[in-house]
Image (tube, rainbow, N blue to C red):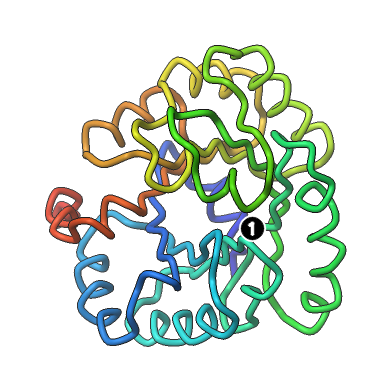
Amino acid sequence: MMSIYQHITTSISEGKKLLAVLIDPDKMKLNNVSNFISKMNTSIATHVFVGGSEVNEGLTEALVLEIKKHTNLPVILFPGDVIQITDKADGILFLSLISGRNPDYLIGKQVEAVSKLATTNLEIIPTGYLLIENGKETAVQRVSETKPIQRKDIKTIKDTAKAGELLGMKLIYLEAGSGATHPIDPHIISEVKQQLNIPLIVGGGIRSLSEIELAYKAGADLVVIGTAFEEDDTFFKALQRVPN
């Protein structure tokens, strides 16, 4: 059976673009999951990410179990903290916040997670995580106590992403942050993509089909949508699959 990461790289080699729906356990009520996922299943979504910057213990596992009742898409943890790790998911983005200089989020939380991960069968995908300034303070910035890289500092963004690859990361994730006022600029995506030989994920502030398409055109291999669905789950209608 193909691993999650193999599926991502194979899809990219075949020219396919991927879309992840990010569900925050702190914002999604369990009794709303069935309806939400049924809409998602008719869309072009290829992955489900589960996680948030500030989530109470136990919520993530309960949400993952409920999601998996209603979809066959891979469910991947996108954790803001070690307490969000659950073996009920299929995989985990093992994040290092390489845009910041807080050792807790560069390596500290990762060391703390090892003993929990050792008791799971989660597919662990090392991911370099870059927070890019978007005009407002985000939850990631507040919780991690790190500053995002300025949008205009494209050289630092490119060099940081490439450093993540050279350190052995399997994915690079450019993040504007939950509730961002605007998405990552296509020029930044393009510049970063040209530096990389590994898949590029882009998320934060994307609220329309046209913004998704701009991110793809600029070089994003996988786009992540979260806030747009939290605000209006009818957005799935714009992302419905075309019948074969």
Question: Looking at the image, which residue is at 36% across and 50% down?
Answer: 225
Number of labelled discs?
A: 1
> Could you say which quadrant of the image residue 150 lies in?
top right
Q: Nearer the viewer, residue 66 or 25?
A: 25
Q: Position of residue 213 (x, y in %)?
A: 29, 32
The relative height of residue 103 versus residue 73 in the rendered view (above or below) is above
> Could you say which quadrant of the image residue 145 lies in?
top right
The relative height of residue 108 versus residue 220 in the rendered view (above or below) is below
Q: Position of residue 241 (x, y in %)?
A: 19, 55
> Could you say which quadrant of the image residue 152 lies in?
top right
Q: Position of residue 210 (x, y in %)?
A: 22, 32
What is the three-letter code of the residue carrying label 1? Answer: Leu
- Residue pointed to by mark 1: 93
Horizontally, is 46 left or right of 231 in the view? right
Residue at disc 1, secondary structure? strand
Q: Position of residue 58 (x, y in %)?
A: 56, 85
Horizontally, is 203 left or right of 191 in the view? left
Question: Looking at the image, which residue is at 79% across and 69% down?
Answer: 113
Q: Nearer the viewer, residue 41 or 107?
A: 107
Question: Looking at the image, which residue is at 70% across and 57% down?
Answer: 94
The relative height of residue 32 versus residue 177 in the rendered view (above or below) is below
Horizontally, is 155 left or right of 15 in the view? right
